[in-house]
Image (cartoon, coloured by chain):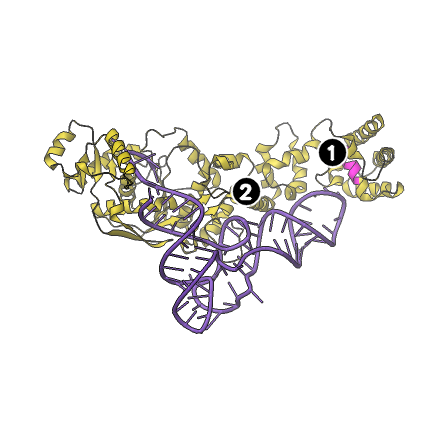
Amino acid sequence: MRVRVRFAPSPTGSLHIGGVRTILYNYFMARQNQGAFVLRIEDTDQERFVASALDSIYDGLGWMGLDWDEGPREGGPHGPYVQSERLEIYARHAAELVADRAAYFCFCTKERLEQMRRAQQARGEITRYDRRCRNIDPAEAAERARTESHVVRLKVPEDGVIGIEDLVYGHVEWPLRAIEDQVLLKSDGFPTYQLAVVIDDHLMEISHVFRAEDWLPSTPKHLLVYRAFGWEVPPHAHLPNVLGPDGKKLSKRHGATAVSEFRDAGYLPEALANYLSLIGWSPATEEEVFSLEELVARWRIEHVQRANGRWDRERLDYFNGVWIRRLDDEELGRRLEPFLPAEWDRRVVRETIPLIRERIRTLAEASELIAFLFSDRVQYDPSLLVPKKRAPHEAVTALSRATVALRYLEPFAPPAIEQALGGVASDVEWSVRDLTLAVRAAVTGRKIGPPLYESIALLGRERALERLEGAQELLEAA
RNA sequence: GGCCCGUUCGUCUAGCGGCCCAGGACACCGCCCUCUCAAGGCGGAGACCACCGGUUCGAAUCCGGUACGGGCUACCA
């Protein structure tokens, strides 16, 4: 049987990082089996619908480098791929169930249901629909349904158990008495999730249902719907959730959660995919740096973990650094582009790339490391110019010697600069460490940064000398 | 409350009865390299495998209970 998997987000906000992990696993499954990956939009909740969400999904997945075969914008043999455009299909199927007496019309108002729940709660009973409308005569119910507001509910057997062999969790079963007569079709004519997923997964010939673990408790409802239609249940796999660092559901409270936020913060899609894949799955070896292609080849549902994982920004940062270091100069330059001011000379930027590659963990960190090359003047605290255990006047001497040494240096290149400054250090009896500290402060305005000699060469003789002189004036004025 | 799921270093995980007085990675600490910071190399600390009981010659691995955590319990998904 051809593998067909799907990702079925609700367009209620921006693409969430936890959702991406689920998408990734589905994607791996599809691609490693030469199967089809289907994008279906589950917009059956009119109240929570967010118009921009579809763009966010397309943007996010596109950026991640994930592609799919069938979806709202690309079409396919089982469309439409937006549930709100499939209402007629759900209505027809719901009617079928009613005709088969597997489902029934319910005329109870939301107010009555509310009241009923409150009363059940007060009595310490479990809250569930009391099945009042279940025994209305079908002919009468059909008649009333023509004029009265109603929903369609599933007739759930009173007793027994229903279970599934989950690909991750193994055998799981539920007592039927804990399940209420689920609403399948809402009074606004829209299906509930429970009805729509089952119908769509069936009609779209989905071969494997991979979804987040929070769906596990509603699985019996879906099984009952499959049973009502007489359809075969495809293999299911529930995937452990990605929780916040505190073990609670990952949300804005924990920081960024939208894919776009990570992109804007300078994360690489390779790193995000690599990191995310490793929450809940492991290759069962000690390797852990994987490209998307390698993940497709290596990922196995058998090695998916049952326990929920937690979000760990530090570890993501580490993977981001790994992936940044794997980029060649040209590619890193391209990725850096959106993070650098447009007016910076790209010829100079290109030269800095080998110098900063190992020093940044996110693309966003690059600009501050090399900003000194593009600004007219640098600002800093004069105390930065004076190494520990040295006096300001000594620093003035050292800097002035450095100025002299660099003024006519030929060639004005890193090795010569290194030699020249080394000479200055021994002349003034400073360690190279102290001398470079002072010079670095003078030239870049910072304590840390890319290698000094290269930085000076890139800055150019004129500006380097200017800054060294400026530093001396600053010290003398203090 | 009811139902379901989970529990190996702070975090992500390896482990599917003896190879484990538990291995790797992130983070942390130290040393080396070194013009700073990184990167890299080497080393260290860190898990009585949630707890209790059982099965077994032998359990992190199998079974039961407890505790704790998470999820679901809507005309949300």
The kind of residue on which mark 2 rests is Arg
Which residue is denoted by mark 2 in the rendering? A313
Q: Which badge, 1 or 2, is on the more N-terminal residue?
A: 2
* Magenta stretch, main secondary structure class: helix
Give the residue at the far front of this rendering: A123
Under tag 2, what secondary structure? helix
Q: Quadrant for the C terminus of chain A, please.
A: top right
Q: Which chain is purple?
A: B
Q: Residues within 10 Å of mark 1 (few under 14, many from 20)?
A: many
Residue located farthest toward the right when viewing the structure as drawn: A427
Q: At which x and y percent is residue A95? A: 18, 37
Whether residue A282 appears in magenta in the rendering, the answer is no
Q: Marks 1 and 2: which is nearer the front?
A: 2
Residue A412, can we see it?
no
Magenta includes A442?
yes
SS category of the residue bearing label 1: helix
